Each structure stands twice: as C-alpha cells, then as structure tokens.
Amino acid sequence: MIFGVVFSTNARNKRIENDLQMIKEKLGIVQENRDFNLSDEEIEEELERDALLERESNETGRINTTNELNEQIEKELEEYLELDDKDKDRNK
C-alpha cells in the first residue's frame, strides 16, 4: 500500500512539473540553467565581495540593504512586465 501511495505521489508531481513547464513555455518564460558550475574559491570570493559591500554600505550610512535592493528589482520587473503587456495588447 505504501508503494502505491509513493508511486501515485511521484506520478502526480511529474504531471504538475510538466504542466508548469508547458505554462512557462506558453508565457515565454525562459528558465536559465540551474547548474552554475562554480568552484569553491569562486563562491568564497563572491561571498566575501558581498560581505565587503554590505560593510561599506553600513559604514557610509547608506541604507541599501539586500531587502531594499530586492524590492527595487521587483518594482522594475513589474514595470517591465506591465509595459510588455501593453505592447502585446496593442499588437492584437
């Protein structure tokens, strides 16, 4: 019985994943490759760079935290998507 539940759940997850992929393709969302192939040294350098930038921003009194940067990026993305939707509506 447990095998049946596991098999059923696995099959359902695969169907959902396939449906999501089809939706992404129809919306034109391109999924970047998730394999970044970074070495440990490259990861450490990037983390050190991020920590240094955060320390510098705190020392200079700037408030550019990661959350604020993320909010700014999300806002720009929403504006871009709205412009893209308007362009698509015009072309119909």
Image (spheres, rainbow, N blue to C red):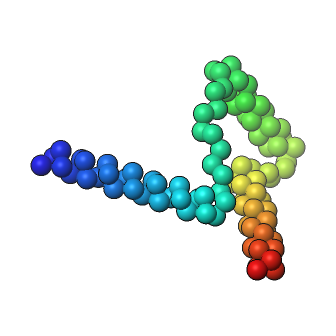
Q: Position of residue 57 (x, y in %)?
A: 82, 43
Residue 68 shows in this picture: no
Left or right: 57 as drawn, with respect to 74 = right
From what the image shows, is residue 92 above or below residue 25? below
Q: Position of residue 92 (x, y in %)?
A: 76, 80
From what the image shows, is residue 63 above or below residue 42? below
- Identify the residue at the far left of this view: 1
Residue 19 shows in this picture: yes
- Identify the residue at the far right of this view: 60
Q: Position of residue 19 (x, y in %)?
A: 47, 59
In the depicted view, which residue is nearer to us: 80 or 20? 20
In the depicted view, which residue is nearer to us: 19 or 75? 19
Residue shown at 60%/33% (left/top)? 35
Left or right: 61 as drawn, with respect to 30 = right
In the depicted view, which residue is nearer to us: 32 or 92? 92
Residue shown at 39%/51% (left/top)? 14
- Identify the residue at the far front of this view: 92
From what the image shows, is residue 66 above or below residue 91? above
Quarter-wise, where is residue 71 in the image?
Answer: bottom right
In the depicted view, which residue is nearer to us: 44 or 91? 91
Quarter-wise, where is residue 29 in the image?
Answer: bottom right
Left or right: 50 as drawn, with respect to 17 = right
From what the image shows, is residue 10 above or below residue 51? below
Quarter-wise, where is residue 84 in the image?
Answer: bottom right
Q: Position of residue 22 (x, y in %)?
A: 53, 59
Total marks shown come to 0
